[in-house]
Image (cartoon, helix red, strand yellow):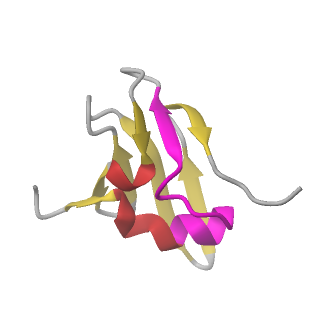
Amino acid sequence: MDDLMLDGNAVAGLLQDVFAVETTTAIATCRGCGAPTPMGATHVFRGAGFVLRCPHCEAALVTLVQGNGQVWIGFPGIRTLQLAVTGP
């Protein structure tokens, strides 16, 4: 594992603030290779923001940048995102 690489659990709090649901168990289907992966199992690289990559093909699934009380999220590599929700 690279010094700048973490796993998807590293951004769980940030994603939960945005989505208001548990995101580490959300299933992202990669647009590149088609593999379904729990968000907590993605490879996260940090720099000016975060890039969550597919652990199977390394395609960029999600980009996150936080600053000045705002969060910018891009989903360039996710075909579908399956989230568990509660309620009626």
60, above or below 9, in the image: above
Report x, y in % for residue 27: 50, 42
Residue 24 counted in the magenta span: yes
Residue closest to the eye, 15 or 47: 15
Which residue is located at x 39 percent, y 22 percent? 32
Quarter of the figure with the N terminus: bottom left
Report x, y in % for residue 67: 53, 74
Residue interval drawn in magenta: 14-30
Report x, y in % for residue 85: 72, 55
Residue 64 counted in the magenta span: no
Which residue is located at x 48 percent, y 62 percent? 65
43, above or below 30, in the image: below
Residue closest to the eye, 66 or 30: 30
Q: Taking 55 as reference, is 70 left or right? A: right
Report x, y in % for residue 44: 31, 55
Quarter of the figure with the C terminus: bottom right
50, above or below 67, in the image: above
Q: Taking 54 as reference, is 17 left or right? A: right
